[in-house]
Structure formats: C-alpha cells, structure tokens
C-alpha cells in the first residue's frame, strides 16, 4: 500500500506500477519515482544507519545532495553506495541499505552508539597507527559498512568513452541553462546541454511556479522541444558534468545512454565556453539530534509533494532562517500536510514570506534546539533565540531550511574564484580563470526571473538575448545561522560521516585550525556527498569559534568528481585484449597455430617466447631451439626491430654526431655496428647502420628504444641542427624480416633460391645486397645476433608469411626450427652480446662493457663524448662486464648481488643474466663486477637468501670468442 | 550492433612518404595530384590522393595496383639528395568506417573534432585513434582511418568492442 | 588534458604530444667550455614555479617539435617573455 501517496498530481505515471524490493521486503511505486520517493510513498521512514555511530537515519534530500541514506543495488545493475534519491525506480529493482546488518530496524552495529563518546574526531588516526594503518583499514571499512565493489563485470553491456567538441557546454538544464541553450542554439552555436536529472527543468520540476501565466513545466516542455529540433544542440539527461579540467576539458558521465548495450558513457568534451548553471543546494540547520528520521530539507519535501505526489509526514514543523521555506509551507499545506508551526530564527519575517501562508502560526526569533523520538521524530523542542521559555511541539516531520548555497563545485574546479556574499550569506562565483561563466541559482540569482535573465545573457554571450518570459517567485532573503547555540544532543554538521559540532571544536582545540585540516581531521565533507548540505556550516562553525568572518576561513578545495562516477565509465572499453596496446607481426596467426608461447617483449610487441612441442617443458624447448641454431639451423622473425630510412645531404654528418663511432666512412652496400649515447653519457641504444647510397641510409635500433630514438633524432634535427638536410622515415613496418641462422643457413638460403651471390667472398659479414629470395623482392643483410652464420632476409610485410612458410619447408631437410625470444636470449648471452635492458644501467659506460673501441678518438664531438670522459675522470672501481660460471653448476637469478666473500657487505656488482648453455652443457652468466676486466679467473660470490654461490670470473664471451662462426 | 556503421579492414594501399621543399618535390614527382594548398589538406587525381601531413611532408596514397607505376615514376633511389621519397605501403592498416553512425564510432577512439564545419571533405590529419597515432580522412559516407600496421589487430579488437 | 597549439595543426589534445622537457640553453661546444659549464648544461634543468618554456613533440600528429610557455601552477599556456608585443 502506498499509504503516503497523494490522490493526484505529480510527474509520475500512475498507469505504470513498478515492483521493487528494499531490505528484503516487497513494495510498489510508479514510473517516474526515485527509490527515495517510492519508499516515502510506502511510509518507509527509517532507511539507514549512520556510518560511525549506527544512529537511525531517514531520507533527508531529494537529489545528489542526499547525505543520509546510501543503498546498494543488487543483481544485474549491482553497484554500491548510491544515494537513495538518485536511483530511478525500475521494475524488479532490488536494493538494501548500507551501514547496517541485518536491517536498519535491528542493527547489531548500533551498540556503537553506546561508545559514541569514545569515537571522537581523529579516533582512527590516533588509534590505528601502529605499525601501519593499512593493516586495520579493511576491517574498519567492513565495520563502517560501506558497500563493496561488484565482483564481476556486468553481462548486459559495456562502458564507453567518447570525445566531443562544442562552442558552449551548459551544465544544468534548469531555467537558466534552458534559456542559455535557447540563446546559443538559435545563434547556431554547437551546444551541449547536460543535466543530471531524469528530465529537464531543474528546480521547476519541484516547485509550483508559473511562466507566462502557465505552469512553468509547460514552458520547459516547449523549450526542450525547440532545442530538440536544433541539429546543433545535443541534450543529455541523467548525465553529470563531473569534472572540469584545464583548457576547458570537461568530463560528463551519462548514466543511461539510449543504446541498450552501453551501460554508461563518459564524455570528454573540449568546450570553447562552459556555462555553470548548476543550481543551488539547500543547506541544513545544525541543532541537537538534527539527524533523526523525519528531519528533511524543506526543498526535498517540496519535491516529494509536487513532483512525486508523496506526503512524507502528516504533521510538520518548519524550521527556517530564510524566505524559501514559506513557499514550501504553502505547497505542503496544499497537499494536506498539517503545519503545526513555522519556526523562523529571524526576529522579523518579511511580509512577502508571511503572505505565502497567511493564516499560519509563525514563531519568529525562535530556534529548534532538539528533536525527540526513536526511529522517527515525534516532537521538537523550541525556544526563543535569546533564551526564554521552551516549548515542545509534536510532529512527525521537520522541514529545515538553512538558506541556499550556489552549487559552485564545477565553477571552482575551473579555478574560478569565489566571494562571500553578505546578503546571501554564502559563497558565490566571482572571477573566472578559464572560459567559464555562471548563471542562475549557481550564480546566486536565486529567483526565477533572475535565473531566466542571467541564463539568457550567458547563452547569448554578448549576442542577441532572447525575450525573457514573465514569471512569479517569492523574493529571497536570509539571515545566517550556522549552529543553534542552545543545541541539546549531538548536532551534526556532516551526517554521512557522523561529524558533529563537538568534533570540529575538538579539531580546533588540537590545533587543526585551517579549514582543510579540520576537514581531514574530522572527515567532515569527505563522504560520498562531499558535504553538499553541510560544508558551509562547518566553515561557519570554524568562523564562530575563531571569531573570523567566513570569507577569511574560506572554503575547502572543490575537486572532481562532483558526484560519484563508476570506474567502468572512466575505463570505457579498455579491458581484456585492449587493456594495453599490443603489436603483431604478420605471422602472429602462424605462431599461435603452431603452439608458440606468446608474450609481450618490449615496445608492446607480442612475440613468441618459445615453440614447445607436445609434452615439452620450457627448458627442453629452449634447449632444443638453441641446439638447432648451434648445430644446424634456426629461423626467427626479427621484424619488431626499429628501422628508419635516413635521406639527405647531411646524413653522414648527422650519424657521426649520433653514434660514438665513425659512420661516414662506410661504403654503400656495407653495414656497421654502432653505439649511441645520450649527451649525459648514458648508453642510449645500439644497432646497425646500412648505407644504401651516398645519401640514403637504413639504421636499426633495438625494439624497445625505437620510439625514444625516433624522438631523439627528430628533436636534434628540429632544434639543434635545423640547417641539416636530413629526413627520417620510420620503416619498421615496411621491412619485416626472416632471419636464418646456424651453420646450415647458407644451404637453406640456396634452397630458397636467390640470384644474389651469397658466398662469403661476395657477401661477407656486415654486407648486404638487394634482389629476390624465393621470387620475393628482398634485401639480404649479413648481421648476426646469435653468433652464427646468419642471413637477415628483409621483405615487405605482405610477403613475410609466404617467405616464412617457404623457409620452414625448404629448411626441413636441414633440421630447421623456429626459435623464440628465449633461445635468442640464451644465444646472445653465450656470445656476450649486449642487451640494453640487462647489462646497461645508469653508471655503465661503453668502456665498462668492453666497447671502448667504439668510442671514436678522431671525432672532436659526438653525443655523450664529453660526459663519458668527465664521468671516468678520477673514478676508480668501475663495474665492468664479465662472464660468470656458477660453481657448483646451477642457475643464478637475474639481478643477484655479488658481495665480497659472499658476506653481508656492500655489493661489488650483480649478475645481469644467467642461462643454460647447450654448448657447454651448464649454466653460464654475465655480470657487472667492480674492476671486473682485471679479475678474470677469480672466484666471486653471489649472496642469496638461500645461501652463497661461488662463481668463477671469465671474459664475457662464453662461445666462439674469435667470431669465426658468424663470419663464415 | 550498437551503432549503424560498417567497419572494413581494407587491403593495403600504395603509399609513398614524400619529404623536402615543396618546389623540389613537385619538380621531381610530376604525376602526383596538385600539392594541397594548406596544412592537413588533401587533393585527388584519379585514384590518387596527396595529403599534406606535416611541415615539408606529404603522403601519396593510391590503389595497390598502381604501386609499381608510382615506384617507377617517383623513383626513390634516384631522387635528388635534398628530397626523400620512401615507399611505406605496408606500414599502415586502413579501416573504413561508414554509415549513419560513422562519426559516433570515430568519436569513441578519436580525439579530433570531425564536425564537417571543422574537418571538411579536403581535410586529413594524423591524430589519435584508440591511443595510437592514426591518419584520418573522409571517404564516401564516413571515414578512413589508418594506424601503424602492427597495431591493426588491436584496433580491430577495439572497434569490435566499441560496436558490440 | 591540455590543448596544445601546434604551429602546423593548430590546437590539439595533449594526448597527441610527447613531453620533451623544459628547454635548456643551446648546446655549447663541449670542447670550448669548462667542466663546470658542461656539467651545468647537462644537469641543470629549469624548474620554476610559474611559466617555463617547454618542448613538446607532436608525435601522433605532424611530427613537429614545438615550444610553449606553460605555467606549472595552472597548466595555462602563456606568453613567453619574448612573445610580448
Ligand atoms: Zn602538428
């Protein structure tokens, strides 16, 4: 039974009954209800327990300001900690209160009320600090009772991100926002009109006002219709502008896009101009037991009565310090609510306010100082502000209105300043910093006529202002009251976090007297509602206590999000296969079909690690692949290597500056290994340069450094040497390659068939030639990353798969095996070839790596030359690259420290790599060791948790030190 | 389908990267469409499109069947020292997104303002698409969008998810 | 998300750019300066609270390396001392 549903009126559809469940009990509401209005219609008044003390709580607000009742939605749209007032009712909705178990009526945590005086502000900070707050946090959160995150992703759809651009973004489709949209839309501007409600209208939805002599909602409907017809206007409802970033970049969370498979959409909008027409939020009043169920914001009651046709009580008291509550009183009376009294803290009530409720008893100069009752307010205690006889008035509803605060959150996020307005006794927008404006109640224009006018002017932006329709409204006047001095019982400033006046006083006594410190120490304003109804009272309480005016106390910083945004909406579709960027070469499908174990191996490339055969483990597969290369022939896809074509008259000069060794002497058709340093002497990259002709080159970089080297080269050319004639074109994905390596590589090449003379005499090591291989246009390059005879066959990606499959086919008689990056790693460690991620870190220079030969003495200058000289000057005990042979034979983990004698002393180096060498049939490694070059033959010690491992120091080349095989 | 849009992964185009002073390039590259008048603009001639994609930088696109003809005519190997011509046909994977909702699909991945008043028929630009560098231009009823070839599979995944 | 003006493309989303750090003085001839001067060039990076001249690379756009003056307190792109008038 919807016992408190009014017989008529409201913006609900009484023909559509919706069934829902709250805390396990079934109820009914109507289409157009929120969960809050439906609960109130069903007479449900106790809806929550408070966060810290587990005090009984009810519904206080009607929108995003709701500080009291949070619910958890179950099932398909599972989500936690939703203000009950922002949940649209739908058929089958299942919700429960947070903060209480098993129900708000019978709540085990309520024993906390008995200990309330032992849980003051800062209690958690003082109590749970050793050894670490994080140890306590999970159980405290659980006791606090906030809902957990949903355990699985929704099945019914996905989240989406979208970029947008507009001339004017309007936050809030109330009277000001709608007028602004009309003005800008008619002028042909690209407008986005964003509103957090289910339908446009803002405060007009909740109030009984007229525009042009007709119900204001008629004007809203006409306006929405006109805007709808404009192709240059985008209207979003149930969408919140939740973040305002630098350069007018604005975030919008659209909670129910029209596409059924999109759960939520997050818009990232670049707006030339932003209008904050975000309305105003009524503030609560601070007196004893002001949190009891049945104490509600006056404006919320107005919304329930007018918009939802709900009567939240039968006999009401109204407590106010301003005029707006008188309009509410009139609406309440019209809905049949008996108004016992209006308590106005002002000594003189303006005639205009009195005129709204002509026959009503008004106790001016009075305050409510406490409420009575258990799970519902039963009476209030009232007394004159200046002292005197108290009076108890029975009621089941207390409407409170502490005046209005412009919703300046978005404005403040834009870094616009605020000024304290004495007449309105609140902070309102002052000076913009970005291209932002504010209008309507958000600007402190608190009557309808002012809102319509300021919205129209803001939207026109200096252009033609549309005609302002005539409207009626009560003039606004307020006298601030930040707390009732005579309060008896806990007087809450922040209901959601259970922060009372006493807590703020305690914080101030303990020295936390900056408003930001008060916030953090008491947690006031740090709840999900971000203190929308109560923060100003905290500021007021601090001001009274410190004897300062409010503008000197100032506000805390307003941060995004304005209201909670689900993580899914922020993440968009980035999950699973697209959570990180990844890259593929054209033979990925082949690799997967052939059982390759694929993983990311630098610069987002997915590469095969190894190709296990049936029943083969990791080490067996890698050993087999290594043996194939050392004894017969192996083949791998070397495509991800960074590759650049350089062209121009000054490439010689440029490369000589870029590399440590001389490149300009290289002849066309030949290749040269080169080393690149950053100008502070760090090893930046190494690679091979190929000279195609006098002024055309191809250079390669390591896979992981390709982007960084590209940036480096372009920066130098554009900023340091703008007069150099050099053009760089990235061709990493124009030249893929199949690299055939091993003693039988030449036989496989011949089997593939090529007219290029690949004899060692004509095409020696570090030479290349263009032609065809297996009928495919190709460039053969004689480089080797494995230490074996090696042919890098470069082709266009369109031909890679064909060449790859042919290579395996014709190579089969020679025992060819595809090899992955794991075997490649073993083979390069055996050869002592550098891997930038392993052997190179900050302090290491080319001399330490045994690459002193690459540091040109002839060139006067190149990147890093001076810095390396400077760093080496006077330093002793450099860490130098050596080989290590663990004795006894075992694996040493990468990065394992070497200490003198294996004792607990400062390290003298570390193991950079350790692999199982199939040619030696044992583990071998590389290490960086202090003065390592002069310590070959010594025994050093690896210090591990499990014990000390001795290792013999050797030269860093474990295999074919003369390089005969790779030259063959 | 969330969106009324068709997504095709296109076969590769013939692509040539042209760099250098416009005067020197136009003297060497004779058969190309006329050099576009401004930054991030394009011109057409028959099936070929010439895009001005950076300072002293153009991209020539044509059907793959014309690649050999362009290779012979542009002759990268013999081009003068002060200009650079590189065949880059394989470096880009093109997606064609067409249909009534094409711009909505684009807006999920692309940060650029593609409103017709801002990004007209003769517009072209490198920008961002699902986090990758991407070339965007208009085609009939929609957009062509190219990413570095090795990211093609990932962008396909993104587009599948976006339109699921 | 800043909106960075590119001399070729016009204003573009920050995501299209790579940060190149504050602009350092022009690279001196390493053989013509003292150790101290070289070390200072290498290690001293401007880091003011306020406007700083910075390099950004339009890597996902036209490839231009450009400079802007950015106020480190606000992300506002401001006129540099040399830009006025
Ligand atoms: Zn640019």
Image (cartoon, coloured by chain):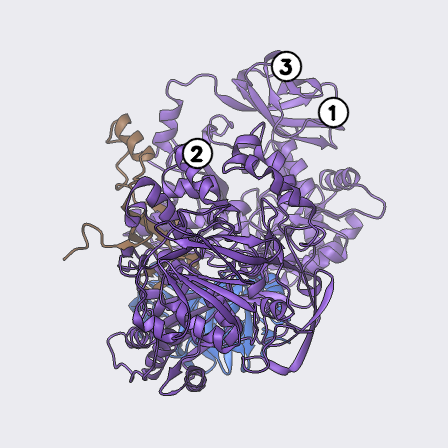
Chain of the residue on which disc 1 is drawn: A
Q: Dot 3: few (<14), some (14–19), or many (≥20) neighbours within 10 Å?
A: some
Residue at 29% of width from left, 42% of height from top? Answer: A547
Along the polypeptide, which appears first: circle 1 or circle 2? 2
Q: Are marks 3 and 1 on the same chain?
A: yes
User: Which residue in the protein does label 3 denote?
Assistant: A902
In the image, A841 versus A5, the foreground residue is A5
Q: What residue sits right under mark 1 in the picture?
A: A890
Is residue A694 visible in the rendered structure shown here?
no
Could you say which quadrant of the image residue A164 lies in?
bottom left
Image colour for chain C is brown
Q: What residue is disc 2 on?
A: A682
Answer yes or no: disc 1 within 8 Å of ligand 1. Answer: no
Indicate the chain coloured blue by its letter. Answer: B
Q: Position of residue B129 (x, y in %)?
A: 50, 64
Q: How would you rate the neighbour count of disc 1 (Cα within 10 Å): few for under 14, some for 14-19, many for 20 or more?
A: some
């Amino acid at each position: 039974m919807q016992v408190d549903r009014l017989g008529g009126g409201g913006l609900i559809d009484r023909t559509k009954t919706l069934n829902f469940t709250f805390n396990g009990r079934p109820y009914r509401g109507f289409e157009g209800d929120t969960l809050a209005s439906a609960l109130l219609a069903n007479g449900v008044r106790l809806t929550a327990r408070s966060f810290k003390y587990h005090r009984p709580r009810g519904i206080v607000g009607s929108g995003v300001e709701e500080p009291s009742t949070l619910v958890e939605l179950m099932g398909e749209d599972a989500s936690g900690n939703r203000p009950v007032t922002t949940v649209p009712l739908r058929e089958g909705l299942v919700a429960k209160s947070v903060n209480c178990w098993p129900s708000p009526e019978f709540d085990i945590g309520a024993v906390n009320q008995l200990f309330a005086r032992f849980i003051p502000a800062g209690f958690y900070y003082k109590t749970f600090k050793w050894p670490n707050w994080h140890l306590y946090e999970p159980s405290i959160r659980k006791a606090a009772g906030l809902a957990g995150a949903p355990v699985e992703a929704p099945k019914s759809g996905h989240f989406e991100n979208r970029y947008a651009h507009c001339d004017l973004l309007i936050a809030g489709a109330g009277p000001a926002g709608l007028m602004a949209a009309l003005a800008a839309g008619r002028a042909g501007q690209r407008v986005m009109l964003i509103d957090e409600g289910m339908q446009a209208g803002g405060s007009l939805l909740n109030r009984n006002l007229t525009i042009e002599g007709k119900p204001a909602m008629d004007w809203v409907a006409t306006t929405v219709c006109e805007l709808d017809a404009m192709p240059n206007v985008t209207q979003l409802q149930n969408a919140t502008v939740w973040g305002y970033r630098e350069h007018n970049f604005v975030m919008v969370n659209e909670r129910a896009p029209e596409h059924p498979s999109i759960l939520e959409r997050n818009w990232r909008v670049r707006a030339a101009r932003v209008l904050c027409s975000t309305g105003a939020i009524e503030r609560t009043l601070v007196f004893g037991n002001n949190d009891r169920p049945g104490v509600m914001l006056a404006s919320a009651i107005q919304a329930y009565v007018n918009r939802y046709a709900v009567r939240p009580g039968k006999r009401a008291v109204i407590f106010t310090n301003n005029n707006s509550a008188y309009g509410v009183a009139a609406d309440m009376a019209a809905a049949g609510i008996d108004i016992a009294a209006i308590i106005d803290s002002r000594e003189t009530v303006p005639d205009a306010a009195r005129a709204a409720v002509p026959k009503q008893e008004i106790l001016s100069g009075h305050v409510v100082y406490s409420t009575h009752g258990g799970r519902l307010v039963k009476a209030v205690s009232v007394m004159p502000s200046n002292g005197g006889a108290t009076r108890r008035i029975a009621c089941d509803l207390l409407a409170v209105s502490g005046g209005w605060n412009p919703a300046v959150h978005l404005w403040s996020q834009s870094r616009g300043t605020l000024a304290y307005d004495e007449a309105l006794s609140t902070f309102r927008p002052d000076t913009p910093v970005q291209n932002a404006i504010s209008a309507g109640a958000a600007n402190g224009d608190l009557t309808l006529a002012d809102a319509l006018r300021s919205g129209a002017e803001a939207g026109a932006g200096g252009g033609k202002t549309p005609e302002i329709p005539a409207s009626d409204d009560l003039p606004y006047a307020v006298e601030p009251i930040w707390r009732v001095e005579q309060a008896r019982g806990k007087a809450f400033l922040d209901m959601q976090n259970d922060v009372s006046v006493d807590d703020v006083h305690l914080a101030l006594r303990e020295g936390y007297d900056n408003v930001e410190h008060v916030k953090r120490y008491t947690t006031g304003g740090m709840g999900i509602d971000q203190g929308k109804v109560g923060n100003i009272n905290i500021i007021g309480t601090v001001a009274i206590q410190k004897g300062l005016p409010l503008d000197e106390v100032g506000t805390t910083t307003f941060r995004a999000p304005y209201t909670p945004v689900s993580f899914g909406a922020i993440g968009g579709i980035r999950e699973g296969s697209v959570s990180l960027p990844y890259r593929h070469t054209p033979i990925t499908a082949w690799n997967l079909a052939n059982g390759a174990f694929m993983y990311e191996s630098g610069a987002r490339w997915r590469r095969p690690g190894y190709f296990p055969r049936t029943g083969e483990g990791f080490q067996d597969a890698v050993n087999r692949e290594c043996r194939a290369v050392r004894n017969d022939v192996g083949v791998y896809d070397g495509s991800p290597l960074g590759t650049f074509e350089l062209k121009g008259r000054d490439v010689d000069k440029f490369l000589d500056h870029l590399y440590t060794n001389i490149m300009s002497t290289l002849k066309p058709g030949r290749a040269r290994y080169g080393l690149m340093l950053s100008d502070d002497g760090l090893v930046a990259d190494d690679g091979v340069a190929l000279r195609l002709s006098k002024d055309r080159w191809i250079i390669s970089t390591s896979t992981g450094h390709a982007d960084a080297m590209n940036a480096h080269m372009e920066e130098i050319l554009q900023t340091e040497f703008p007069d150099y004639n050099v053009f760089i074109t990235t061709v990493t994905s124009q030249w893929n390659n199949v690299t055939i390596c091993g003693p039988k590589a030449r036989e496989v090449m011949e089997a593939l068939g090529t007219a290029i003379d690949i004899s060692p005499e004509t095409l020696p090591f570090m030479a290349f030639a263009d032609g065809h291989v297996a009928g495919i246009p190709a460039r053969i390059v004689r480089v080797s990353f494995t230490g074996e005879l090696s042919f890098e066959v470069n082709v266009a990606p369109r031909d890679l798969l064909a060449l790859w499959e042919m290579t395996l086919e014709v190579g089969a008689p020679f025992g060819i095996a595809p090899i992955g990056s794991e075997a490649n790693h073993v083979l390069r460690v055996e050869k002592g070839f550098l891997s930038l991620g392993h052997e190179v870190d900050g302090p290491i220079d080319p001399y330490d790596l045994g690459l002193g030969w690459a540091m040109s003495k002839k060139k006067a200058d190149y990147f890093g030359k001076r810095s390396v000289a400077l760093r080496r000057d006077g330093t002793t005990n450099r860490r130098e690259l050596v080989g290590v042979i663990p004795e006894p034979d075992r694996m040493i983990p990468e990065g394992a420290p070497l200490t003198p004698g294996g004792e607990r002393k400062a390290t003298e180096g570390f193991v950079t790599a350790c692999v199982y060498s199939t040619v030696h049939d044992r583990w071998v490694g590389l290490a960086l060791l202090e003065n390592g070059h002069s310590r070959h033959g010594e025994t050093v010690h690896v210090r591990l948790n499990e014990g000390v491992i001795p290792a013999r120091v050797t030269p860093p080349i474990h295999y074919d030190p003369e390089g005969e095989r790779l030259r063959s | 389908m969330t969106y009324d849009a068709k997504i095709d992964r296109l076969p590769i185009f013939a692509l040539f990267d042209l760099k250098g002073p416009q005067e020197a390039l136009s003297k060497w590259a004779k058969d190309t469409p006329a050099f576009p008048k401004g930054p991030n603009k394009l011109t057409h001639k028959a099936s070929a499109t010439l895009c001005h994609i950076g300072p002293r930088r153009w991209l020539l696109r044509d059907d793959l069947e014309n690649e050999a003809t362009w290779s012979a005519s542009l002759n990268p190997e013999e081009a003068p020292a002060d200009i650079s011509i590189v065949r880059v046909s394989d470096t880009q994977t093109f997606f064609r997104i067409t249909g009534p909702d094409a711009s909505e699909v684009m807006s999920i991945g692309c940060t650029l303002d593609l409103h017709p008043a801002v990004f007209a028929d003769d517009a072209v630009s490198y920008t961002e698409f699902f986090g990758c560098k991407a070339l965007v231009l208009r085609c009939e009823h929609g957009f062509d969008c190219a990413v570095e070839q090795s990211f093609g599979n990932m962008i396909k995944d993104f587009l599948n998810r976006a339109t699921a | 998300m800043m909106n960075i003006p590119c001399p070729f493309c016009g204003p573009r989303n920050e995501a299209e750019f790579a940060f190149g750090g504050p602009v350092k003085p022009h690279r001196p001839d390493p053989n013509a300066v003292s150790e101290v001067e070289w070390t200072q060039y290498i290690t001293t990076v401007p880091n003011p609270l306020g406007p700083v001249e910075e390099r950004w690379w339009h890597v996902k756009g036209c490839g231009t390396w450009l400079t802007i003056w950015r106020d480190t307190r606000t992300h506002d792109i401001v006129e540099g001392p040399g830009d006025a008038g």
